[in-house]
Amino acid sequence: VRDLAVASPATVSRCGMLYAEPSNVGVRAIMTSWANTLPKWLTARVPVAAETNFKIKKRAARKGQKKTKDVQEAVEMSQEAQEAQAERELQMSTHLSGLVEWLLIPSITFTSLYLGQHHFCKISELWLVFEACIAAFTDPAQQTDDDDAPTNPVHPPTNMDELKTLVDSLFVFSTVWSVGACVDGEGRDLFDAYLRFLASPTEPETAPQLILDAVPNAYLGLPLDDSERDASITMEGLRRKLGTPLPAKGSLYDYHFAVESMSWTDWMDSEFYDDTFAIPEECEFNKMVIPTIDSVRHGALTKMLLTSNSPVLLGGPTGTSKTVIVKELLLNGMPDNYISIFLNFSARTSANHTQGIIDGKLDKRYKGVFGPPFGKNSIFFVDDLNMPLPEEYGAQPPLELLRQWFVDGGWYDLKTKEFMNLIDIQFVAAMGPPGGGRTHVCLRTLRHFNLISVPELSQDSLKHIFSTIVSWYLNKCEMGVRGLCSTVVDATIDVYNTIRTTMLYLSLSLSTPLISSCRCHHRPTPAKSHYTFNLRDLSKVFQGLLMFNPSSLKTSDVLVQGWLHESQRMFRDRLIADDDREWFDTYMQSKIEGDFKLDYRAVLTAGLAEKPAKDVPVSPSDLLFGDLFNDGAVGEYKRVTKYQTLIEGLEESLFDYNSMGTGKRMDLVLFQFAVGHILKIARILRQAEGNALLIGLGGSGRQSLTRLAAFCMEYDVVQIEVTKAYTVADWKQDLRDCFLKAGVQNKKVVFLFSDTQIVFPSQMEDINNILNTGDVPNLFAPDETQQIVEDLQPQIPKGDTRADTRLGVMDFFTD
């Protein structure tokens, strides 16, 4: 056990205790054991030609042929080869031990002392990364003419010096993505400087003072025996020159070591990056994945590890594209023999629920053995790994179930109680930092994963992503607004940073009261716990901007007006105090006048047929945008310029709704506040994957306004009816009816769910799955699934390969 935190005194008193210190095992013993498992070619085996020559002649001798002079020479060659092999194995073993002493152990100590990282599993991570790198090589001694053999094999070097150079570079690369894989952005800069200082002895002393102090401390601070210490160690003795120099520019995190060319290559100049990338003409916003150096390198590392049967865990703050990176890789980047299954954990996820999902995706191979179809490998992506709540004694049952597979290769059937061996499956997971409902994951579970930290996107990456999207969109607009791309992107990122960090991040100089107001108002408090923002909020500003018809954005005033409205919807609508909203309006005015160099009043009144008099005040809250009854009917998304026409259209829709008798009669007074909320709800409904959480007091019109907005948008509203006899089976049936209506009948559906309708904890688990994956696991029985497949196959467009398989059709159903 890890500790005795939940052990009773009675239990402790009946057990003999042995406490194992991690330092007693040490790094050297583990690395020595690992070195014994490395392939033979890495220990510089004898040349293949000589070995083959020996085997042929030895075989002739076994057949009773006379030992000719050639055979005798072959035997002597074998003896010499064995001696040379033993010598080379000793050299490589000594070389690997030297790398451990020179780089691995000091690096672990450096990250522990200066970067606050635990090193409980960094050693195993290093050798998994190293093995994934050398998997690209084909051992000449084992090469065959099979169809499965690689068409362009990469042969390892046979020369000892070249082999050492290769091992040095791969060891540095593996150290970066094991020991240094879990540090944040600032920690990566320090670790990069540390490694460069150790591996570049000829460069001038330009390292930070922290590095100069840390290098000897990282060595002398190790838990070594006195006999292993070298008190005379010098700075020069700790530094080493590599055969292949490290890249001079950028960070080591920006490069990977290409075994084909035996050189360091920028991730963005490698085969992992598609330099011909372009956004398709009719691409939806939620389908856009803009490659950056972060997505390229993390995706490439994840693929490299998964194809080497090494589990991967991506960790990082919310909104750093962890889920996007993994989904893009699993759906478009893996070989054809891999099947992807997605799971989402929540606080209510149970071990039985998790086992049911996984078991339902596997077939029975033979007695006691289960797996994907023959010739396939299943990869289960577990999102929000650390969300399940710990039970009474601190364990997280869903995670303990996964750990049982890592350790034992399977688990017990819930019905027959027989052990199930699960083969040809693999796990990749993502999680955020502990806090906000997320918990700490047990180290016993974490040790089975290769941990990769995904830091927050840099400002350059953010600008690259959204500049690519906005530039693609503005190219469809008038020439007069195309030049505003960089200004729109920079201003939006500035607004996001200001709101998120609670400090002004502006290029213009603003007054001190405004700065103090920002710091005071936007700190999350118990009363304002929802004052938190992430990159999803930033991206939704641009998603809203792309809803406008490009032909309608004829002037910069109209474009900036739309940008102001979308910023209000994503940031201002979350503010609950009048002072907060007033601060936001003042701040946005300063952005428009300072960054865009436009008159604030002219922006607010742009597009109006009749401009208000100069002495009449205008407010940003007067901006109403939507596609409801702008011209007497549902039209394009734009500013409402005919307010009376909108009111008449809504009143007519309300009359039709009550006349049709489709639901409870609604007698609503459509004042401006209610109209504004109807337009906000309609805006969300017209977006891809648009989901809304409406917060307010009872009787404030949340459900009524949603029903009216859905009716205007020609959506069917589905809502459960909770009675005293309402059961889980009734809930599942309601979900099935809703899914069939949307997925098979192809009707637009709004699922309206209220907090008063929460009867079972499992309901929130299902809602969480719907929001994250669009699916509820094991919702349909096998015969119902088969019926869905038969009904949907004719509806799948020609050329869509998903029509060929049952899983593909169900994926189309979920979409």
Image (cartoon, rainbow, N blue to C red):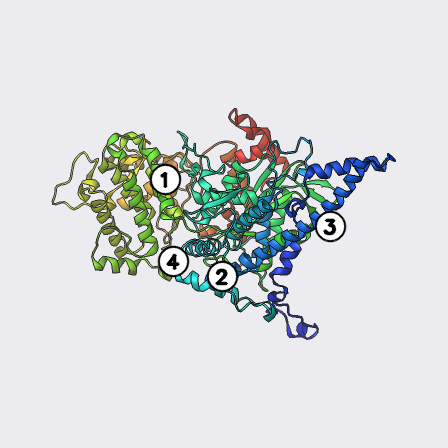
Q: In which quadrant of the rendered image does the N terminus lie?
A: bottom right
Q: CA distance from mark 1 to mark 4?
A: 25 Å
Mark 2 = which residue?
110
Tell me, yes or no, whether the two marked residues, 2 and 4, touch with CB atoms within 8 Å: no
Disc assigned to residue 418: 3
Mark 1, residues whose alpha carbon is within 10 Å: few (<14), some, or many (≥20)? Answer: some
Tag 1: residue type?
Answer: Gln
Instruction: Identify which residue is drawn at 71% across, 38% down.
Output: 50
Q: Earlier in the sequence, mark 2 or mark 3?
A: 2
Q: Secondary structure at mark 4?
A: loop
Q: CA distance from mark 4 to mark 3?
A: 47 Å
Q: Secondary structure at mark 2?
A: helix
Tag 4: residue type?
Answer: Ser
Q: Earlier in the sequence, mark 3 or mark 1?
A: 3
Tag 2: residue type?
Answer: Phe
Q: CA distance from mark 3 to mark 1?
A: 51 Å
656 relative position to 410: left or right: left
Tell me, yes or no, whether the two marked residues, 1 and 4, touch with CB atoms within 8 Å: no
Q: Earlier in the sequence, mark 4 or mark 3?
A: 3
Mark 1 = which residue?
543
Mark in front: 1 vs 4: 1
Tell me, yes or no, whether the two marked residues, 1 and 2, touch with CB atoms within 8 Å: no
Tell me, yes or no, whether the two marked residues, 3 and 1, touch with CB atoms within 8 Å: no
